[in-house]
Structures are given as structure tokens and as C-alpha cells.
Amino acid sequence: MGHRHFQSQQAPKHFATGMPASTKCIDLRSRLLQGLQQFFEISRDQFVDDELRIPEWRQADEALERAYEACAAREAIPDIKCLCNLARRYIDMAVEMSTARSYYDGRI
């Protein structure tokens, strides 16, 4: 599970008023991915390595990867939003499962 970086092709701020639609879409894709990556990292930081080895974290990582691939392929914004929402649900499930395991193992 590595870090992903979507390279935004943002125009300088002084060109913001005349940005073409494609540049605005790239910027939106970048913001969606940055928010998703932050959510993923903050969620993972709550747990130790043992708790991150469960299948739910692998599924969350794979969902995050699919969102990055969709952005790199410049898929439609609604599709990327859908993939980001799906990844968030996988992350939420991983958090719930890790929390439950910690609780039952007596760590919480």
C-alpha cells in the first residue's frame, strides 16, 4: 500500500478566470483525490500494523487505487466521484472492522 500522487496540471492563479474546462476538470479530479487520500491516511493512522493487515484494508487500498487510475485515465468527473465514494465506504468498513478487532482483542 503505497502513496499515490495524481499530478495536477493546474494553471497559474493569474490564469484562473480563463481556464479551459479540461483544466478545471483536472483541478477537480486532483481535489477529489487529495481529499480521499487524506481520509485514507487519517483513517489508517488510528491503527497499528497488525490491524491494517485485514482484508478490508486491502479492499480499501484497491478502491483508492481504482480512483487514482480513473483520474489518470481522465474518466468523467461523475465516474470519479462515484469511485471516490465507493473507496470512502471501503475505508469506513475497514475502520469499523479494525475497531471491532481492537475491541475484542482488549486493546480498546
Image: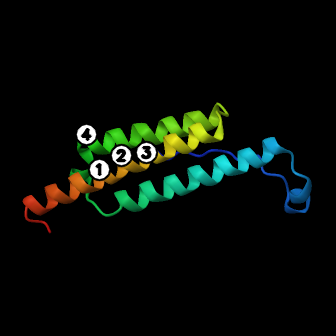
Q: Earlier in the sequence, mark 2 or mark 4?
A: 4
**What is the crowding at mark 4: few (fewer than 14 residues within 10 Å), some, or many (at least 20)?**
few
Residue holding disc 2: 90
Are the residues flagged by discs 1 and 2 in contact, CB closer than 8 Å?
Answer: yes
Please tell me in which quadrant of the rendered image residue 55 appears. Answer: top left
- Inter-mark Cα distance, 3 to 2: 5 Å
Task: Look at the picture and state if 59 lies above or below 31.
Answer: above
- Inter-mark Cα distance, 2 to 4: 10 Å
Instruction: State which mark lies toward you, 4 or 3.
Output: 3
x, y percent for residue 44: 35, 57
State the residue in front, 86 or 33: 86
Residue holding disc 1: 93
Residue holding disc 4: 55
Are the residues flagged by discs 3 and 2 in contact, CB closer than 8 Å?
Answer: yes
- What SS does tag 4 mark? helix
Q: Earlier in the sequence, mark 1 or mark 4?
A: 4
- Inter-mark Cα distance, 1 to 3: 10 Å
Considering every residue shown, the one lying at the far top of the view is: 73
